[in-house]
Amino acid sequence: MAGSSEQQKFSFQEILDTFKLCLTESKEVDLQHYLDGWRGLVKFLNRLGSVFGFISKDASNKIQILVGHLNGENGSQYVTIQSMVNFELEKELVDLTKKVGQHPESGCRTLLRLHRALRWLELFLERLRTSTEDGKTSVMCAEAYNESLAQHHAWVIRKAAGVAFCVLPGRLAFFEAMNVGPPEQVVAMLGEALPLISEVYQITEKLYAHHNLLELA
């Protein structure tokens, strides 16, 4: 669990604070805060070693693509996830015909990958929060994965993930990596954080469903 000074300073509380900022008064999702939240989640995953590398590396790549859109000439269209979806659909930047290779780095397609991974993390962290057993994290993680990301991954990735989950540390080690305090404090923090993450997920899910974007290739 030890790492660089940057890792030592990390606290899961930062992620909670960031996701609090994600939603605007009109319940739109601020893309910059969303990406900041994901940067925190990547830090958390990296603190657990290489086990989640296949997810954290992909997430980091997707974050960089979306930062490129935010800082690009049309950056003002990417302030919220809602404005991004409207802009890319209007400009026909999203390939709805599942022809892989056409606009592979559209904001909508890129964010969908983070969106799916967020669901996995939400499900897994909820199991960690409510469980009373220390040694069942591999089962909790596998169940959460099978309910979310697995259906979007190729067989080879699913197989590798299953092997990786078998060597996960216990529940208390995850709590230690969050760097929040004693277990009861971590449980309380997760109780506050997960409904916020869930709300951000559900708003994004409804938006993508409304525009038939949930199965983008």
Image (spheres, rainbow, N blue to C red):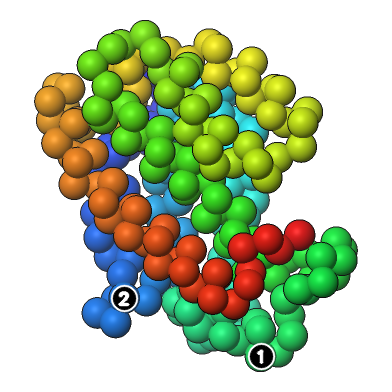
Relative to 166, is 142 above or below? Answer: below
Where is residue 175 shown, x and y percent of the image?
A: 28, 24
Type of residue at label 1? Glu
Q: Tell me, yes or no, whether the two marked residues, 1 and 2, touch with CB atoms within 8 Å.
A: no
- Tell me where residue 97 sits by quadrant: bottom right
Where is residue 20 shown, x and y percent of the image?
A: 25, 60
| Mark 1 and mark 2: Cα distance apart in space | 22 Å
Type of residue at label 2? Lys
Where is residue 143 shown, x and y percent of the image?
A: 49, 28
Disc assigned to residue 51: none
Question: Which residue is depicted at the point 53% across and 11% down?
Answer: 167
Relative to 151, is 3 above or below? Answer: above
Residue 33 in view: no
* Near-viewer residue (119 or 72): 119
- Tell me where residue 68 sits by quadrant: bottom right
Which image quarter is the N terminus in? top left
Q: Earlier in the sequence, mark 1 or mark 2?
A: 2
Horizontal side of 207 relative to 213 (left or right) equals left
- Tell me where residue 123 sits by quadrant: top left
Relative to 77, is 167 above or below? Answer: above
* Near-viewer residue (30 or 95): 95
Please rate how many residues cluster around mark 1, counting C-alpha atoms within 10 Å: few if below 14, some from 14 to 19, many from 20. few
Question: Which residue is depicted at the point 27% across and 65% down?
Answer: 21
Horizontal side of 54 relative to 119 (left or right) equals right
Horizontal side of 146 relative to 47 (left or right) equals right
Disc assigned to residue 90: 1
Residue located beneath label 2 in the image: 27
Q: Circle 2 — which element?
A: loop
Relative to 145, is 114 above or below? Answer: below
Residue 171 in view: yes
